[in-house]
Image: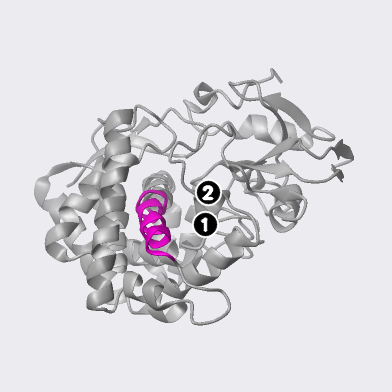
């Protein structure tokens, strides 16, 4: 098979090149490659190798960046996903207090109401963009609910966040780098001001929980740390759901037999959510830095080198999944690693993302047979997120 440059976003213009990833999995050892700036990498494409690198954080480190280019952190701020222990452990332990099962369970009714209203708005509009009007709007509104943004201030927070999201595709949004930086700054300033209000008058929301967290040896979160966490959560927390909704709806429309099975047996919804997340694999990859000499798939890997964890390949690995090329809403077992392959950097928002998808799927199942795509979905030109810029649709 002809070699492809997976660091070139154009390799994903027609969708994830699953045939090439299968070729790499079948090839012995590891594949060596370079990114656009000349940084060398080893590709990890097999399920077992990605899981191992995810869980062995003493050998495979996140700092200074989990992006394939160490120059891609433009904020200059300590993003939690770019940190290693002990600082990462401290921040994650404190932040998780806002994502406990009890707190997520309390979101069921508010999120269901958001889902119903957005779907009604899309149906009433006639023609709508399933990507922008549903897949992106849903997580943004849910996150403002979780954080505790007052209802009359949510539209502005959502608008600022839309300017910071690009899904790894600089042409995704009608924005500019300057507007994105300004929007990021506006969000930081807003959340720091909101924290002041919550300190004076606590409420039943994420900010109040994070302000109160840290009565043990882990210490407290500083206001700027909470504001940065909220700002990055608004962007990164919306991207996973966005990709899963667009890709999941397409999968159900392309597999009417699976949609029929789901409508006939709604107890399959939790399994269907996990299958959609596996099938789509929203974030295709992250990078790790090798801290000490090791060996992977018989290939010596030296300290100071870097590896790319290709989740999108691992989730189609025949050694880990039965018929991985089949979309199966009843798939069991389903050891997908779309939120990370275990270890300390598993996505902290996994529970929230699956909650959103579960409630959306429950509300959308009966409407899907009436959903009609009115044009060809436009893919994002990126090798980082499996996403679409636009998906024109209507309910007939």
In the rendered image, residue 298, in percent from the top left (x then y), is placed at 89, 40
**Residue 144 visible in the picture:** yes
Mark-to-mark CA distance, 1 and 2: 6 Å
Q: Nearer the viewer, residue 252 or 314?
A: 314
Q: Nearer the viewer, residue 107 or 149?
A: 149
Residue 193 in the figure: left or right of residue 164: left
Quarter placement of the N terminus: top right
Q: Secondary structure at mark 2?
A: helix
Magenta-highlighted residues: 222-237
Residue hosting label 1: 275
Residue 74 in the figure: left or right of residue 365: right
Q: Which mark is residue 217?
A: none
In the rendered image, residue 217, in percent from the top left (x then y), is placed at 58, 78
**Residue 391 visible in the picture:** no
Residue 229 location, quadrant: bottom left
Q: Nearer the viewer, residue 105 or 117?
A: 105
The residue positioned 50% from the left and 71% from the top of the image is: 94
Residue hosting label 2: 279
- Do the residues bearing badges 1 and 2 touch, measured as CB atoms within 8 Å? yes
Q: Nearer the viewer, residue 85 or 317?
A: 85
In the rendered image, residue 84, in percent from the top left (x then y), is placed at 64, 55
Crowding around mark 2 (Cα neighbors within 10 Å: few <14, some 14 to 19, many 20+) is many
Residue 313 lies, with reference to residue 212, above or below; the image says above
């Amino acid at each position: 098979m002809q070699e492809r440059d997976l660091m070139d976003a154009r390799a994903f213009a027609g969708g994830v090149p699953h045939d090439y990833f299968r070729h790499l999995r079948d090839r012995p050892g590891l594949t060596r490659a370079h990114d656009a700036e000349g940084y060398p990498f080893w590709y990890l494409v097999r399920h077992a190798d990605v899981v191992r690198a995810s869980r062995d954080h003493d050998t495979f480190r996140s700092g200074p960046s989990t992006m394939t280019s160490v120059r891609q952190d433009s904020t200059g701020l300590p993003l939690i996903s770019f940190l290693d222990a002990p600082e990462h452990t401290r921040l994650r332990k404190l932040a998780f207090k806002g994502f406990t099962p009890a707190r997520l369970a309390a979101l069921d009714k508010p999120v269901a109401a958001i889902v119903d209203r957005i779907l009604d708005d899309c149906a009433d509009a006639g023609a709508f963009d399933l990507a922008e009007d549903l897949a992106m709007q849903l997580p943004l509104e849910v996150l403002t609910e979780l954080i505790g943004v007052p209802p009359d201030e949510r539209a502005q927070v959502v608008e600022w966040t839309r300017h910071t999201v690009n899904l790894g595709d600089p042409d995704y949004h009608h924005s500019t780098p300057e507007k994105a930086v300004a929007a990021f700054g506006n969000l930081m300033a807003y959340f720091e001001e909101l924290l002041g209000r919550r300190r004076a008058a606590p409420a039943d929301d994420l900010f109040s929980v994070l302000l109160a967290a840290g009565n043990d040896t882990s210490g407290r979160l500083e206001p700027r740390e909470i504001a940065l966490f909220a700002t990055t959560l608004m962007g990164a927390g919306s991207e996973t759901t966005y990709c899963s909704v667009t890709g999941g709806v397409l999968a159900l429309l392309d597999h009417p037999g699976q949609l029929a099975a789901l409508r006939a047996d709604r107890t399959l919804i939790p399994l269907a959510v996990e299958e959609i997340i596996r099938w789509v694999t929203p974030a295709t990859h992250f990078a790790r830095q090798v801290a000490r000499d090791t060996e992977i798939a018989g290939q010596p890997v030296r300290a100071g080198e870097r590896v790319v964890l290709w989740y999108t390949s691992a989730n189609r690995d025949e050694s880990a999944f039965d018929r991985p090329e089949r979309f199966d809403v009843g798939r069991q077992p389903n050891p997908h690693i779309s939120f990370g392959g275990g270890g300390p950097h598993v996505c902290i928002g996994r529970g929230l993302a699956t909650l959103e998808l579960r409630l959306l799927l429950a509300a959308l199942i009966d409407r899907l047979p009436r959903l009609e795509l009115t044009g060809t979905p436009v893919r994002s030109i990126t090798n980082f997120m499996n996403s679409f810029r636009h998906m024109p649709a209507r309910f007939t």
